[in-house]
Image (tube, rainbow, N blue to C red):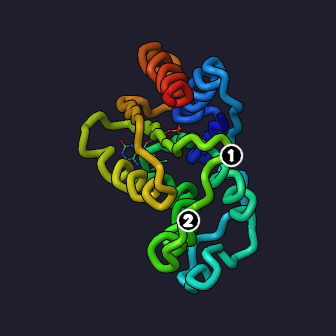
Amino acid sequence: MKVLGIAGSPRRGGNSDLLLEQALAGAAEAGANVEQIIVARLRIAPCIACDGCWTAGRCVVQDDFQDVYEKLIVAERIILATPIYFMAVSAQLKAFIDRCQCLWARKYVLKQTLPPTPSGEPRRGALITTAGHNVPAGFRCADTTMRYFLDTLDAEFAHKLHVGDVDEKGAVRKRPEALRAAYELGKQLADSG
Ligand SMILES: Cc1cc2nc3c(=O)[nH]c(=O)nc-3n(C[C@H](O)[C@H](O)[C@H](O)COP(=O)(O)O)c2cc1C
């Protein structure tokens, strides 16, 4: 089972990174083959709405998105981790998600189904968010974006972990319950058949 972790923060070693690290450790403990992608390190341009994907179901813009796309469609499990920026996901992660418009076109315009995952396991996803605030409404936008992102992959939204009250870099280190919850999230995601 392949678990792909997508780190959405431009702040390396920050709160969402630390939680993603825990989640991937939990998934590895459950026997998964884990890989992490750091979107802020990649060259992924925003979608330009050229509708190039309406013909072939693939994005025609040639940049690092192409490699991530290949990994995305063969992963049985996907974990997105992001800080909340202005009540939404980070701009780096949003650019990546918007480029998945090719998956939307594939499903809803071309009416094509994705090939099954290599193991035949259904696709499932989990979302990890961190924020300075601690109000449920602050995570709603990221939740909705995640739901529609996973829909393009016909993936189930299986788990979420929202950790508020963490603003400084690494503040989540003082929240052992959150680190443990992230570890368990990764383990359960990889365990679920
Ligand atoms: C550009 C920017 C926008 C932010 N917007 C919000 C926000 O809308 N609500 C909030 O609670 N925190 C906000 N924050 C704080 C981050 O969500 C918080 O520090 C988070 O833990 C950072 O995660 P990271 O360390 O993984 O980058 C913002 C931070 C930045 C840099």
Percent x, y of residue 9: 57, 45
Percent x, y of residue 38: 67, 46
Q: Report the image quarter containing ligand 1.
A: top left
Query: Residue 56, labelled with which disc?
Result: none
Query: Viewed as shown, does residue 171 lie left or right of 9?
Result: left
Q: Which residue is mark 1?
A: 118
Percent x, y of residue 130: 43, 36
Query: Residue 100, labelled with which disc?
Result: 2
Whether residue 136 is visible: yes
User: Which residue corresponds to the image point at 58% horizontal and 21% vertical from the top-left?
Assistant: 26
SS for dot 2: loop
Q: Quadrant of the N terminus?
A: top right
Tell me which corner region of the image, top left, top right, bottom left or bottom right, holds residue 75: top right
User: Which residue corresponds to the image point at 44% horizontal and 20% vertical from the top-left?
Assistant: 181
SS for dot 1: loop
Label 1: few (<14), some (14–19) or many (≥20) C-alpha neighbours in 10 Å: few
Q: Is residue 52 above or below residue 30?
A: below
Nearer the N terminus, badge 2 or badge 1?
2
Percent x, y of residue 133: 32, 37
Q: Is mark 1 within 8 Å of ligand 1?
A: no
User: Which residue corresponds to the image point at 44% horizontal and 34% vertical from the top-left?
Assistant: 167
Whether residue 170 is visible: no
Tell me which corner region of the image, top left, top right, bottom left or bottom right, holds residue 106: bottom right
Label 2: few (<14), some (14–19) or many (≥20) C-alpha neighbours in 10 Å: many
Asked if marks 2 and 1 touch (Cβ < 8 Å), the reply is: no
Q: Looking at this view, is 83 or 66 the one in front?
A: 66
Q: Is mark 2 within 8 Å of ligand 1?
A: no
* Between marks 2 and 1 in the image, the one whose residue lies nearer the viewer: 1
Q: Amino acid at mark 1?
A: Pro
